[in-house]
Image: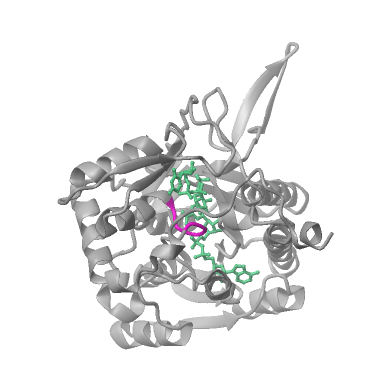
């Protein structure tokens, strides 16, 4: 199968591209490298050194003999997207290429507008390119579990059947997300569902939970194949951050009381979920949604697990929650579709946590402690406009 991976330079896009290539697919990647420029803007960088895209694909070719074509460009540039899709003519497009940090989207008005413009417009351009070039192309789009928020009822996989005043309908599951970033994903989902309805496109929206870990079978083959590992207060995700904090002897930062529960998965399951989804296409006109995570845990449970496994002393500190989110809530999200298609989950274990401690220890000299504390507060609306008044 020919697969075009958008966002192929990112934390998840790169390991997915080489996982799909290793599985025998023809793979091309595209990226505008904006993730590397957020690092410059924030004064942060990946814990693990990462090679340039050219060096990554050259290393992959040297090690495996397999070629990955690169299309550098911005998804917000419609002619670029159209010509890339026409030129590569994939069977499947895997779309990772969005601004993915909730705190980044909440920095100020400029970052909220950027996040929603980048994500919604880029996704629309992909939909139009598929509709114009070949409506048979399967779009596999990364959404997020955070689209649903934390409702007081079970979370279904994208759709829910509602009985109302004696009538029944199957509708998109109601969404109540917790950041302008998460909202951008809701807008994308609605646009994709509409495109499936009007143009007969086939699409799978993968509502993924919080990813942790950094190595996959393919990235371990050579240091030039490593993917990024973010630990800073803006892009670092909770489990990866707490591993770094434990190794540095810093308190593990639980926001608020830590009762907020999230679906989690290891990066090795992300790449497998993508392979399984690509190899099992949605039907023509179908907007299919899978909840992509393997286990759910509260933030407090994550901190307790890491503190218990760490061989040295690790303390946990509840700090004022910079976000506006429920810390005490019901959470039961269905996630059977991918398992039914063959996913064998890799659950959080002492071995996995120990290997992450090892990777962090090896790269400890690269850590900038000043980048770790959270700096973005949801209730503040600071913007350049407000400052210039
Ligand atoms: P990432 O920021 O590391 O990778 C995204 C890549 O997309 C980057 O390389 C960036 O340069 C590129 N990109 C962004 N906007 C672009 C544009 N307009 N044109 C071209 N390229 C562009 O993020 P990630 O952690 O790899 O996440 C990938 C996807 O998975 C995102 O859509 C994210 O929302 C989703 N997701 C991530 C997680 C997680 O825990 N990391 C969890 C759930 C969902
Ligand atoms: N949290 C802490 N301490 C920390 C960092 C985070 O308590 O040091 C808490 C947050 O308050 C939140 C939870 O941990 O309740 C998760 O935060 P996170 O930063 O790990 O994840 P989130 O902001 O939700 O975003 C990440 C990815 C995003 C993806 C999302 C999946 O950055 O791209 O969409 O996970 S989900 O959460 O399922 O929507």
State the residue at coordinates (76%, 54%).
199
In terms of image quadrants, where is residue 93?
bottom right
Magenta span covers which residues? 233-237
Q: Is residue 86 above or below residue 378?
A: below
Using residue 153 as the reference point, say whether residue 365 is left or right of it: left
What is the count of numbered marks?
A: 0
* Frontmost residue, 380 versus 143: 380
State the residue at coordinates (48%, 26%).
328
Furthest residue in direction right, as rendered:
389
Residue 327 position in % (x across, y down): 49, 31
Q: Quadrant of the C terminus?
A: bottom right
State the residue at coordinates (58%, 53%).
376
Residue 220 position in % (x across, y down): 27, 71
Q: Is residue 92 above or below residue 56?
A: above
Q: Dominant secondary structure of the magenta stretch?
A: loop
* Frontmost residue, 27 versus 266: 266
């Amino acid at each position: 199968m020919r697969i075009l991976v958008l966002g192929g330079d990112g934390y998840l896009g790169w390991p997915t591209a080489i996982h799909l290539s290793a599985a025998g697919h023809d793979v091309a990647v595209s990226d505008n490298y904006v993730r590397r420029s957020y690092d410059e803007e924030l004064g942060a960088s990946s814990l693990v050194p990462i090679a340039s895209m050219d060096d990554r694909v050259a290393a992959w070719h040297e090690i495996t003999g397999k070629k990955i074509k690169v299309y550098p460009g911005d998804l917000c540039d419609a002619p670029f997207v159209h010509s890339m899709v026409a030129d590569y003519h994939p069977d499947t497009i895997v779309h990772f290429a969005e601004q993915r940090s909730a705190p980044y989207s909440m920095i100020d008005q400029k970052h909220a507008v950027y996040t929603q413009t980048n994500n919604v417009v880029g996704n629309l351009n992909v939909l139009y390119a598929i509709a114009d070039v070949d409506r048979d192309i399967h779009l596999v789009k990364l959404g997020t579990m955070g689209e649903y928020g934390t409702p007081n009822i079970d979370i279904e996989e994208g759709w829910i059947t509602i009985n109302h005043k004696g009538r029944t309908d199957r509708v998109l599951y109601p969404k109540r997300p917790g950041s302008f970033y998460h909202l951008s994903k809701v807008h994308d989902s609605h646009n994709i569902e509409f495109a499936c309805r009007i143009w007969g496109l086939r699409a799978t929206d993968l509502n993924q939970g919080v990813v942790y870990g950094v190595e996959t079978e393919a990235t371990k083959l050579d240091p030039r194949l490593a993917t990024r590992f973010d630990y800073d207060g803006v892009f670092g995700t909770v489990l990866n951050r707490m591993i770094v904090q434990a190794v540095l002897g810093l308190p593990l930062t639980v926001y608020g009381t830590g009762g907020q529960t999230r679906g989690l998965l290891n990066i090795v399951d992300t790449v497998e979920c993508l392979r399984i989804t690509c190899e099992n296409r949605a039907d023509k006109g179908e907007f299919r949604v899978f909840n992509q995570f393997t286990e759910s845990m509260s933030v407090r449970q994550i901190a307790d697990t890491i503190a218990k496994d760490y061989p040295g002393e690790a303390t946990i500190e509840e700090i004022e929650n910079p976000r506006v989110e429920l810390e005490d809530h019901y959470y039961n999200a269905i996630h059977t579709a991918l398992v039914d298609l063959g996913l064998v989950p890799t659950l959080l274990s002492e071995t996995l946590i120990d290997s992450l401690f090892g990777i962090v220890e090896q790269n400890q000299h690269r850590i900038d402690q000043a980048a770790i504390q959270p700096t973005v507060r949801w209730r503040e609306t600071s913007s350049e406009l407000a400052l210039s008044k």
